Amino acid sequence: MSPTLALHHAAAKRCVDLLGALVALVLVAPLLAVLALLVKLDSPGPVLFVQTRVGRGGRTFRMLKVRTMRVGADAEKATLAALNQSDDARLFKIPSDPRVTTVGRVLRRWSLDELPQLWNVVAGHMSLVGPRPFFESDLDDYEAHHFRRLAVKPGITGLWQVSGRSDILDFEDVVRLDRHYIEHWSLALDLQILARTLPVVMSRSGAY
């Protein structure tokens, strides 16, 4: 897969990612400590949830999140398939997922469970802005044009997230937004998406 960004553009994006993620990690460190305590008090299990996702070029990485579900929730996914709001298994969306813990529901509503992914950005697995990372098993159902979304690093936020998040239930709409981002990338676009992210999070639009 040929690179999408020119070398100097990729370098500029990486500098913004690294600086932004490091500053954000310092600022949210006290909050992460509080969240860790709340998660431990709310339900048994680890604070962090580690999941394998697909990144740039189809390479896998371990994505970090604050745990919002009970331990063993992944094994229950098949039994809840009938509750999926989307007809596509690649977009598994349940508004009142019974696996989510009490604290986890609050964290999801405010997207606080995503904060550990700042470390994924520092490590180079992710970008602040980019397509949402999906599961490796999803690639089995990809058509040729779907693989275009793997041309750049996945992001903590992106055009999909600021355009509806969980309210978008058609995988083709997700791909269309991701491809638009990739094909029209600029630092200005990244900054615009970052600026739109906070209002979307505060409004809790499409979050569950």
Image (cartoon, helix red, strand yellow):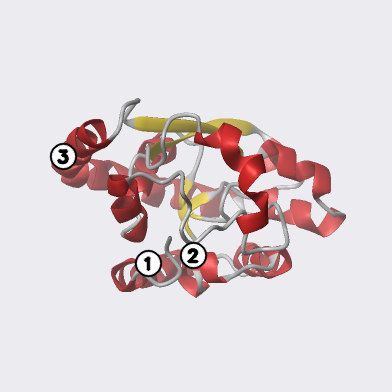
Residue 14: percent from the left, percent from the top?
45, 46
Residue at position x 52%, y 33% in the image: 51
Q: Secondary structure at mark 1?
A: helix
Q: Amino acid at mark 3?
A: Val
Task: Look at the image and tell me whether residue 159 can be seen.
Answer: no
Q: Looking at the rendering, in which quadrant would you find the N terminus? A: top right
Compared to residue 147, the image places residue 95 above or below, namely below
Residue holding disc 3: 34
Q: Amino acid at mark 1?
A: Thr
Q: Nearer the viewer, residue 140 or 87?
A: 87
Residue holding disc 1: 197
Residue 50: percent from the left, percent from the top?
46, 30
* Mark nearer the viewer, 1 or 3: 3
Residue 74: percent from the left, percent from the top?
56, 35
Q: Give neighbour class at mark 2: few <14, some 14-19, many 20+ (Cα, 10 Å).
A: many
Q: Amino acid at mark 2?
A: Gln
